[in-house]
Image (tube, rainbow, N blue to C red):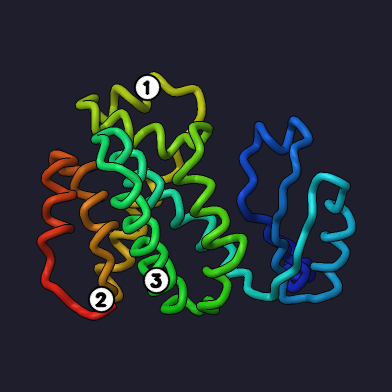
Amino acid sequence: MEESLRPRLCVLSGPNLAREVALGLPAVAVVASRDPAAAEEARQLFMAPTFRVYTNPDIIGVEMGGALKNIVALGAGICDGLCYGDNAKAALVTRGLAEMTRLGVALGAQAATFAGLAGLGDLVTTCASPLSRNHYVGEQLAKGRSLDDILTSMVNVAEGVNTTRAAWAMAQRMGIEMPITEQMYQVLFQGKEPRVAVTELMLREAKSE
């Protein structure tokens, strides 16, 4: 990247399923930049009657939220594929958000960003919608299909697969506790049965929230 452009770098993220945006359904996003003027300029470019944009100075948090939520969405798909119900999925989403925040803050993000559109907003959408590619992968894993078979059959990319590998390695290197990411890594790359992964999460040592 041209060094002179780096201070004006902007990142756009949020609960924005592409198909719904393309259909003109109401959606909201956040644009992050360290340069308030650049963020405002980007906001004005994207703002539309069906697409509302907020600004945020936390580029790291917005980027990390958009990436890490895909790991949790894989787990949400597993919950649905195993018919474990809404209680289990709500718990997964909540504790997954805690993991996302821990890693993001360790990398320099602001914790509040993960309670916003690029964190909780995107997480809820990706974990709940049938349009989510990562949710689909988790659901198919729960039904016994291999990861290679699932990915080969897909036209689009499920970003959460590679993100899980990267986040797991980062957490190991930095000594950050990410039990959901750990279990997803083992399911995806070490052949662990999804039911076993859920059981191990449920049987972890009891602690305060």
Cα separation between marks 1 and 2: 34 Å
- Which of the 4 image quadrants contains residue 142? top left
Q: Secondary structure at mark 3?
A: helix
Q: Is residue 139 above or below residue 128?
A: above
Cα separation between marks 2 and 3: 10 Å
Q: Quadrant of the N terminus?
A: bottom right
| Residue visible at 46% across and 78% down in the picture | 105
Q: Determine contact: label 1, label 2, CB under 8 Å.
A: no
Q: Secondary structure at mark 2?
A: loop
- Which of the 4 image quadrants contains residue 195? top left
Q: Which residue is mark 3?
A: 103
Q: Is residue 108 left or right of residue 206?
A: right
Q: Which residue is mark 1?
A: 152
Q: Is residue 52 left or right of residue 88?
A: right
| Residue visible at 24% across and 80% down in the picture | 208
Q: Where does the image place residue 88, in percent across and percent down from the top left?
A: 29, 51
The amino acid on which the numbered mark 1 sits, given as a three-letter code, is Thr
The amino acid on which the numbered mark 3 sits, given as a three-letter code, is Leu
The amino acid on which the numbered mark 2 sits, given as a three-letter code, is Gly
Q: Which residue is mark 2?
A: 175
Q: Quadrant of the C terminus?
A: bottom left
Q: Earlier in the sequence, mark 2 or mark 3?
A: 3
| Residue visible at 35% across and 46% down in the picture | 86
Q: Is residue 95 above or below residue 136?
A: below
Q: Where does the image place residue 4, in percent across and percent down from the top left?
A: 79, 70
- Which of the 4 image quadrants contains residue 36? bottom right
Viewer-side label of 3, 1: 3
Q: Is residue 80 left or right of residue 194?
A: right
Cα separation between marks 3 and 1: 30 Å
Q: Earlier in the sequence, mark 3 or mark 1?
A: 3
CA neighbours of label 2 inside 10 A, class few (<14), some (14 to 19), many (20+): few
